[in-house]
Image: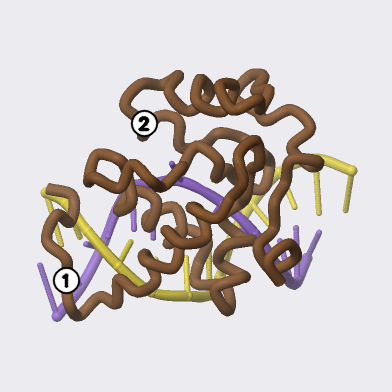
Chain colours: A brown, B purple, C yellow
DNA sequence: ACAGTGACCTTGT
DNA sequence: GACAAGGCCACTG
């Protein structure tokens, strides 16, 4: 299951772009779905960004995509449940120096990395 | 083909 | 300021 078959009709270009941006996120930094979606052009529907991360999930072989650095607007690790383990996301973030408390990134506002602003 | 769900965000009341 | 609803696009059943 899980879209293992790339559908040509579905422009996975969007996913590819998401992968690029997520990969460009510096270590110890975090970004948001809305920022990425906005940087890609417009509101693709921030939800699609999340889906793109699922499509980019390490389980598919894209371990180069640090989805752990991508959180929601609240800085909450909404997708931790989608990781191999419920703590994998938090563990990974803490391993990079990002303090996570109660599934929430501490000083998220400071660690926030906006492609449209940083990369411009 | 239809309906429901989903790692969300923005706007309106 | 808080709560509610809508919107975006894609995937699954």
- Mark 1, other Cα within 10 Å: few <14 / some 14–19 / many ≥20: few
Q: Which residue is mark 1?
A: A7
The number of callouts visible is 2
Tag 1 and tag 2 share a subunit: yes
- Horizontally, residue A108 falls left or right of residue A18, namely right
Q: Are marks 1 and 2 in contact (CB under 8 Å)?
A: no
| For marks 1 and 2 on the same chain, the one whose residue lies earlier in the sequence | 1
Q: Where does the image place residue A43, in percent across and percent down from the top left? A: 57, 72
Q: State the SS at label 1.
A: loop
Q: Is residue A83 above or below residue A53?
A: above
Front-most of residues A97 and A56? A97
Q: Chain under label 1?
A: A
- Tell me the residue at 40%/29% (across/down): A81
Can you say which quadrant of the picture contains the C terminus of chain A? bottom right
Q: Where does the image place residue A118, in percent across and percent down from the top left? A: 73, 62
- Horizontally, residue A85 falls left or right of residue A10, namely right
- Tell me the residue at 11%/61% (across/down): A5
Residue A102: mark in rendering: none
Q: CA distance from mark 1 to mark 2?
A: 24 Å
Q: Chain under label 2?
A: A
- Tell me the residue at 30%/71% (across/down): A12
Q: Where does the image place residue A47, in percent across and percent down from the top left? A: 47, 58
Front-most of residues A95 and A105? A95
- Horizontally, residue A63 falls left or right of residue A67, namely left
Q: Is residue A5 above or below residue A66?
A: below
Q: State the SS at label 2.
A: loop
Q: Where does the image place residue A74, in percent across and percent down from the top left? A: 68, 41
Q: Is residue A28 above or below residue A41?
A: above
Q: Which residue is mark 2?
A: A83
- Tell me the residue at 24%/45% (across/down): A61
């Amino acid at each position: 299951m899980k879209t293992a078959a790339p559908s040509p009709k579905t422009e996975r270009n969007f996913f590819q772009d998401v992968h690029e941006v997520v990969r460009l996120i510096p270590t110890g930094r975090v970004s948001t779905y809305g920022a990425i979606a906005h940087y890609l052009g417009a509101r693709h529907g921030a939800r699609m960004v999340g889906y793109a991360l699922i499509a980019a999930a390490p389980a598919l072989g894209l371990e180069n995509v640090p989805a752990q650095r991508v959180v929601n607007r609240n800085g909450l690790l909404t997708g931790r449940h989608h990781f191999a383990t419920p703590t994998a996301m938090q563990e990974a973030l803490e391993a990079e120096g990002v303090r996570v408390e109660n599934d929430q990134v501490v000083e998220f506002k400071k660690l926030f990395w906006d492609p449209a602003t940083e990369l411009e």
